[in-house]
Amino acid sequence: QVQLVESGGGLVQPGGSLRLSCAASGSIFSIDRMGWYRQAPGKQRELVTTITSGDSTKYADSVKGRFTISRDNAKNTVYLTMNSLKPEDTAVYYCNAIISEKLGAPGNYWGQGTQVTVSS
């Protein structure tokens, strides 16, 4: 079975930085797109950023210039570096990945979520 495990969330002051990590494990044959979504209280889950296997990236307008996504294919890990954090970035951040297991069709996988709180 494939699992995505996130780490790196926490409490940070406005203007601060955090780095989230998400490691995929299990019977992995290949990983296509990886990304991060977030869900604030009372709001729908929204796309933050994605990165393809060819390192093509996409960002939500609200985080462009502040957040950077990267991946380490050798470690099956995706990272989210968040700078200049704002209170409106407060949310549960979820890792997402399109993963093909050995001898299987691609599947859409989610991590358990990690809380990011931006507050003074």
Image (cartoon, helix red, strand yellow):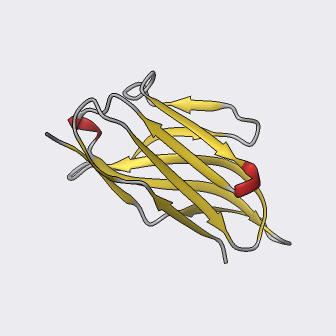
The image shows residue 66, relative to residue 90, as above or below, that is above
Count the marks: 0
Q: Is residue 43 left or right of residue 114?
A: left
The single residue placed furthest to the bottom in the displayed view is 1
In screen coordinates, is 102 left or right of 119? right
Position above or below: 106 against 68: below
Q: Is residue 38 above or below residue 58?
A: below
The quadrant of the rendering that contains the C terminus is top left
Picture coordinates of residue 33, whole percent (x, y): 67, 47
Residue drawn at (27%, 29%), measured in percent from left and top? 15
Image quarter of the N terminus: bottom right
Residue furthest toward the left?
Answer: 120
Across and down, in percent, residue 27 comes to 75, 73
Foreground residue among 97 and 84? 84
Quadrant of residue 47 within the rendered picture? top left
Residue at x-position 41% and y-position 61% = 113
Q: Is residue 67 left or right of residue 105?
A: left
